[in-house]
Amino acid sequence: MERLQAMSAASVGVYEAMRGLCRVYRVADARTGRVGGVYVWADEEHREANLGSPTVAQIPEVYAVHGDVEIRRFRIDASMSDR
């Protein structure tokens, strides 16, 4: 969990500057040590623009990733609100 907390704290400013990013949820598997995130974008255009950015290209180096960075795209057809 320390790695997850360090990732989140170190990247807050970077994520605040990303246009179209609505939410970030950090996820971790304590059993395997895998960490990652779920990113919710305003639309596919903003998402794709970010995936081609230098920020994403630097993930392996910045976070000392062992192996490949896995990126999956999902479409959300409905939204829920806590209001």
Image: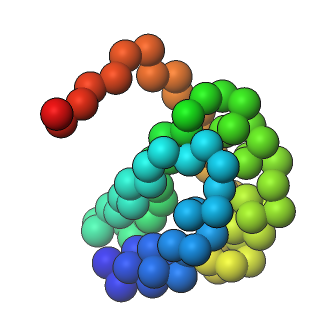
Above or below, 74 relative to 67: above
Residue at figure coordinates x 62%, y 77% from the top left: 63
Residue 38 rendering spot, x and y as whole percentages: 45, 48
Above or below, 7 relative to 20: below
Residue at figure coordinates x 69%, y 67% from the top left: 59
Residue at figure coordinates x 38%, y 79% from the top left: 5
Is residue 66 visible in this depiction of the protein? no
The quarter of the rendered structure image containing the N terminus is: bottom left
Residue 58 rendering spot, x and y as whole percentages: 77, 69
Residue 6 rendering spot, x and y as whole percentages: 45, 83
Tell me the quarter of the picture where residue 60 sits: bottom right
Tell me the quarter of the picture where residue 27 sits: bottom left
The quarter of the rendered structure image containing the C terminus is: top left
Is residue 68 visible in this depiction of the protein? yes
Above or below, 10 relative to 78: below
Tell me the quarter of the picture where residue 32 sits: bottom left
The answer to whether residue 58 is left or right of residue 2 is right
The answer to whether residue 41 is left or right of residue 19 is left
Q: As drawn, which residue projects farthest toward the left?
A: 83
